[in-house]
Image (tube, helix red, strand yellow):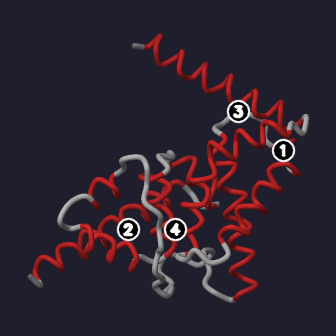
Amino acid sequence: MFEYDMALVAGLSSNTRQIAVRLRQGNVSLLEELVGQYQYRLTRYLIYLLGTRDGVDDLVQETWLRVLERGSSYDGRSRFEPWLFTIARNLAIDSMRKRRIFSLDSKDDDAERDISAQMPASNAPSPFTLAARTEDAERLAGSLEALQPIYREALVLRFQEDLSLQEISAIVGSPVATVASRIRRGLRTLREGLEGGNHGN
C-alpha cells in the first residue's frame, strides 16, 4: 500500500514538473491540453464564485492568458489546480471590485447579499451532485444559493474540486483554521436550510 501511494505521489510530481517546464517554455500545445482538461472545472468554479454566468467566459479567457504570461512562476512542486484557481480568483475579485458587486475579502461575520448560482450539470459525482439526485434536490439548490459567497466558495473547493484545506488556504489567502471554519459554517447552514424545508412540509 505504501509503495502504491509513493507511486501516485511520484506520478503527480512528474506530471506537475512537466507542466512547469513546458509553461516556462511557452509551449502552446500544453495550453491546449490544459484547456481541454481544466476548462469545465475553471468555468464551474467561477460561476460558483460569482453566482452568475455573466462575464465568466471573459474571465476564463483572461485566466488562460495569465497562465501563459506567468507560467514561469509555477514551480511544479504542488498540484496545478490551486495555482490555476488562485489566478482565476484574483481576476474575479478585480472584476467584482470594478463592478462594485460584493467582497470576498471581508470577515466571515460580514453580511453579504445572497446571489443565485446558475450552474451547469456536473459530469462527476460529488457530495453536491449525489444529493441533487435525491428528492431534496430543489431544497439543496436553494440552500446553496442562499450561502454567503465565502462559504459557498469553501464548500465548492473542498467537495466539488476535492482540494485539501492547505490548498484552499493558499487560494483564498486565509489560514487553514479559517477555511475549516468556513466549511463547517457552510455545511451547518446547508443542513439547517434542508431541515427547515422538512419542517415546512
Q: Can you give x and y, in whole percent of width and height, for residue 168 in the image?
A: 56, 53
Q: Which residue is tagged 3?
A: 77
Q: Earlier in the sequence, mark 3 or mark 1?
A: 1
Which kind of residue does numbered mark 1 sit on?
Gly
Mark 4: which amino acid? Answer: Tyr
Mark 4 lies on a secondary structure that is: helix
Using a 10 Å C-alpha cutoff, classify the residue at mark 4 as few (fewer than 14 neighbours), some (14 to 19) or many (20 or more).
Answer: many
Instruction: Specify the quadrant of the image occupied by residue 191.
Output: bottom left
In this view, the mark in front (3 or 4) = 4
Q: Secondary structure at mark 2?
A: helix
Q: Looking at the image, tell me whether mark 3 or mark 4 is earlier in sequence order.
A: 4
10 Å neighbourhood of mark 3: few (<14), some, or many (≥20)?
A: few
Task: Find residue 75 and report its horizontal and vertical position in percent.
Answer: 78, 36
Give the spatial CA distance, label 1 vs label 4.
Answer: 25 Å
Q: Earlier in the sequence, mark 1 or mark 4?
A: 4
| Secondary structure found at label 1 | helix
Amino acid type at mark 3: Arg
Q: Alpha carbon of mark 3 to alpha carbon of mark 1: how far?
A: 13 Å
Q: CA distance from mark 4 to mark 2?
A: 14 Å
Residue 143's spot in the image, x, y percent? 32, 75
**Residue tagged by mark 1?**
71
How far, Cα to Cα, is label 3 from label 4? 27 Å
Q: Quadrant of residue 76?
A: top right
Among the two numbered marks 2 and 3 on one chain, the one whose residue lies closer to the N terminus: 3
User: In the rendering, which numbered label is found on residue 48?
Assistant: 4
- Mark 1 vs mark 2, CA separation in Å: 34 Å
Q: Residue at x 60, y 60 (%)?
A: 43
Q: Can you identify the residue that label 2 sits on?
A: 186
**What type is the residue that disc 2 sits on?**
Gly
